[in-house]
Every structure is written in C-alpha cells, then in structure tokens.
Amino acid sequence: MGIADRAYIRDNNRGSGGFGPGVGGPLRLSGLSVITWLIIINIAVFVVDLMLPTVSILDGIAVDQRASQQQIDRAVPLNVEPPSPPEPGKSWQVPLIDPTTNQQVGAKLYRTWHALNGFGHFSLAKGFLALEVWRVVTYQFLHANVSHLFFNMFGLFMFGGMVEQFLGKKKFLSFYLLCGISGGLLYLIIVGLVAVGVPLPGTLAATTIYTPLIGASGAVFGVIIACAKISPNQSVYLLLLPIPLKLKWLAYGYVALAAYNLISGGSNAGGDAAHIGGAIAGYFYIRNTHLLRGFLDFGIGPAPKKVGGVHPRPAGGPPTRLERKADKILDKVHSQGMQSLTEREKKILNKSARSGGRS
C-alpha cells in the first residue's frame, strides 16, 4: 500500500498551522490551517452573539388533549410578557384561553435566546419537523458559555492538527462537519424515541422535540477518535495529572465516559448522544477517507491533480520504490507518532503524496 492509498499528508507545510500533537512549526498568518479558522469562527460567533440583544422564539404550540377542536380554534393567547431579566436558553409559556369557557386549552412555548443561538440551534422540532436543515451544521458553531466554548476549542486545538495533516485541508473540513452532523442525527434519533414513548433513563426521558442542541463537541469527539487511529501509541498527558497515557486509551476513555453518561442518564445525556454520534462518524470516516472526496467541492488547499488529490497507482501494479519507503515511514508514524519523523522522512512523504507514490 502506497501513500496514495493511505491519503496521508497532502501538504505538510501548508496544512498544519502549528496546532495539535505531532504538528510542529510556528503559527503563520498566511495560509492558516482549517483548525485555526474553525477556532477563529467559533470564538467570533460567540462574541458577536453576546453583543446582540436576546430574542424570544416560538418553539411550538402544546394543546390539551381533552380540549375540542372548536375550543382550540377560538383560543386566544394571554398578554404575557417575557421573563425579566431574560435568561438565554430558558423556556416560558403563553397560555391559550378559550374565551367562551375561560379555560386554558393549550400554550405557546417560547424560549429566550441570544440571537445566533436562537436561529442556529438544532432540535427535532426546528431541524427536522420544520425542515430547517441548515441547523444540523450551524449548531456546531454555537456555545452556551465561556467554559463550553473553551473546552471544545481546547480539544480541537490539541488534537485537530494531527487529523488535518493526515487528511489535508478539504477532507479534514468534510470530516469535521460530517462528525458534527452525525452527532446531531444521533441526538435527533434519541429525542425521537422519547417523543414516541420509548422509556429512556435519566435526563433523556425529560427531553422533548423542542430541547435544543448546541456545541462543537460532537465534531471534536470525532477528531479525537481519528487521532486514536492515526497515532494510537503516541503518549499524551492529562490536563490535571502528569501521567503519560497512550492516545488510543485517552480517546476510547472519553467515548466510554460519554456512553456511560448516556446510558445512566447523566446531567448532559443529550449532549453525550451527540458525542457518541460524532465518535462513531470519526471512527468510520478515518477508516474510509475516500468517502470524504467531493463532500466540499470548492477551493480549500492546493488544487487536486485528479479526484482525491493524487494519481493512484494502477490496480494490481507492484509497489514502487518510493511507495515502499513511504510505507515504512507511515508504519513509524503509526507506532511512534508524527513527532518521531526526521525532515528527510517528511520530505519523502510529501514527494510521494505529490507523485501519487510513483517513482
């Protein structure tokens, strides 16, 4: 198997931006990595959203199943003011009253939001039933508070560079977005199960079709799982404990914790559903990188020579000398990590990527 088959390091000098384990070099303002742009965009969206006024958005209308259709048709909303001071993310109701019987027959369900969170969050009601499908992407760039933003961007900063260098810019962005989309879809499935009456544990049982989902953690979990495939035996250190740990155990430990919280119904079980969905997508796509081809067909990074960015070796042909060299170097990356490579070995990988493994 040559470097073209492994889809490894399309452009070592332009794809890193100085982020993540195994990725060296200073951060440059020109030719910023996708990781850098993602962090800039997430922070910018968060700051701008804090500066915008809060808005109250209608989630939907709940009706009393005992009320007749005539009562529902003639019902009028009470004149209720939004809560003050507004608490972003909190829901509130406007009762619907039948003026003939003076009985409440339903309620309009509102939620107070910072504006971008309000129009970009994902839920079953908004993202699926209302066909506002863009939300499965926009929710990935929204965060509830500073700590939520910090930990997601820290994870992307630490682990994203390795995956971007492995896939190249365009494929990495496709990978990142697909992991986030998969996280949203698994969340949608679980909320849908609750909506049709399937008993689920803990806080999952309290979710409704209006329960919102925001955050980049589904995509970040996919990135971490990808690192466990690219360089499983690379040593990393936990943030609070200076204990070396193999990257694969750190990644799978994160997923195991999210799975436990999901099954046990932890305080953020809905978010953990997105984590698991992103991790599943990351596990799949890092092993099937050819499926990322063409997902984003616009100019990120250098123009490909053919579909996929390299000229594949003819099927059944023997490996070339350059391919054999590249294979040995890739095996070294797999066992020792990117930081173990010499400059000469990096040049061989780049040469093989540019030539499609032919020599």
Image (tube, rainbow, N blue to C red):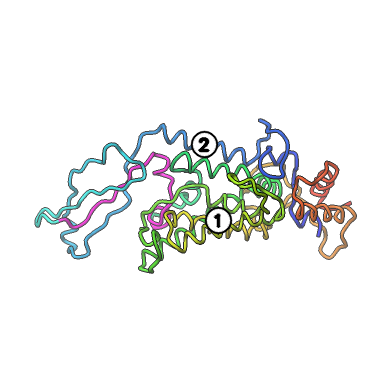
The circle on residue 265 is none
Residue most toward the front? 242
What range is drawn magenta here? 104-129
Q: Quadrant of residue 81?
A: top left
Dot 1 falls on a residue whose secondary structure is helix
Residue 278: assigned label: 1
* 330 relative position to 221: left or right: right
Would you identify the image quadrant in which residue 197 lies? bottom left
Q: Position of residue 159 (x, y in %)?
A: 64, 46
Residue 43 is tagged as 2
- How far is the residue under mark 1 from the one under mark 2? 21 Å
Q: Is residue 263 left or right of residue 211?
A: right
Q: Quadrant of residue 280?
A: bottom right
Instruction: Examine the structure image and report whether residue 124 is included in the region drawn in magenta.
Output: yes
Decide: few, some or many residues near mark 1? Use Cα within 10 Å; few <14, some 14-19, many ≥20. many
Q: Residue at x 75, y 47 (%)?
A: 338
Is 238 part of what is drawn in magenta? no
Seen at 40% across and 51% down, the residue is 212
Q: Amino acid at mark 1?
A: Gly
Residue lying farthest to the bottom in this orientation: 198
Q: Amino acid at mark 2?
A: Ile
Identify which residue, 157 or 250, lies in the foreground.
Answer: 250
Dot 1 or dot 2: first in sequence order is 2
Q: Nearer the viewer, residue 103 or 280?
A: 280
**Dot 2, crowdedness within 10 Å: few (<14), some or many (≥20)?**
some
| Residue 345 horizontal side relative to residue 112, left or right | right
Q: Exactly how many numbered labels are in the figure?
A: 2
- Residue 357 at what x, y percent from top left? 83, 53
